[in-house]
Image: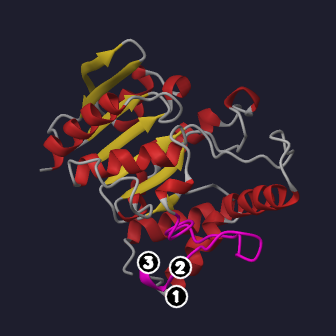
Amino acid sequence: MKYQKIFENCVKECKENGTYIGTGNPNSKILIVGKETATDVENKANRDELYVLFQKESLQDFQENAIKWQLNINNEIEIDSIPNWIGGKDSPLTINPLFPFKSLHQKELKEGQTWSKYQKLHDLIFLNDLSSVKEKEIDFHNNFFLTEMNNSPAKFTKDANKSGIPNRKQFFKESEFFQNFPVIILACSNYISGKEIEEIFNVNFDKQYGNGKQLFWTHFNTDKTKLVIHTRQLSTNVSDDLLKEIAKEVHNFTK
């Protein structure tokens, strides 16, 4: 896989200072920014030993994210060369950030899980259809790059250490790689304000869409070559209608 020079520079910088980059396709056109990576090394869910081991491995993957990206660049790793993740106690728990948990099936996810919502959004944007979303393996990593607004993982938002978010926002503002995405979906609710969006991504507010708690806001740069959408965290009771409306705006912008 040929990586962009701006991404290689980002990886080099983040490897030196221990900054989390993200997962998915760094050559894609769509960036999704969530709240924070969910890990539960303290086992607040009160699950079994395999669950705890998985959470520890997930935290390690988060901490070694830039290192793994550098290995991918050095070895020109392609998605096809990444082995399938089979799950269970005998499966390797560590993942490749280019395609985490490759071969994971949608039916293994709960309806309210963030990845389930991401897959629905992906299929609405690229297929304009949800009919096959539960019948196939997760594949949104092919066309999305995912990162987080908070650089500190936590099982629950209420327990997250949010002290590093201002520095994270400055990182996004100064990063040529993150600024280069033509479509940015800020699915992180009140972790960022409208004024901050305008300052960080050099865009202006356009419209509000939706009803009640199913809202999103669009922003464009001056020459309409960048679309920034701000919405709630895509999990729990996010409606299909909200995802359809977001997908419609993205599709119309990119067609």
Left or right of 75, for residue 31? left
Q: Which mark is residue 72?
A: 2
Question: Which residue is painted at 26% across and 46% down in the image?
Answer: 124
Left or right of 28, for residue 114? right
Q: Is residue 219 above or below residue 76?
A: above
Question: Which residue is painted at 24% across and 42% down in the image?
Answer: 226
Question: Which residue is painted at 70% across and 45% down in the image?
Answer: 153
Q: In the image, which is nearer the foreground, mark 1 or mark 3?
A: 3
Q: Residues within 10 Å of mark 2 (few under 14, many from 20)?
A: some
Is 5 one of the magenta-colored residues? no
Give the structural element (helix, strand or loop) at label 1: helix
Residue at numbered disc 3: 79
Q: Are marks 2 and 1 in contact (CB under 8 Å)?
A: yes
Q: Earlier in the sequence, mark 3 or mark 2?
A: 2
Give the main secondary structure of the magenta stretch. loop
Q: Please tell me which residue lies in front, 132 or 67.
A: 132
Q: Residues within 10 Å of mark 1 (few under 14, many from 20)?
A: few
Is 83 one of the magenta-colored residues? yes
Q: Please tell me which residue lies in front, 65 or 84.
A: 84
Amino acid bearing label 1? Asn
What segment carries the magenta color?
Answer: 80-104
Residue 60 quadrant: bottom right
Amino acid bearing label 2? Asn
Residue 180 in view of the camera: no
Residue at numbered disc 1: 75
Q: Are marks 3 and 2 in contact (CB under 8 Å)?
A: no
Amino acid bearing label 3? Ile
Residue 192 location, x and y as percent?
50, 27
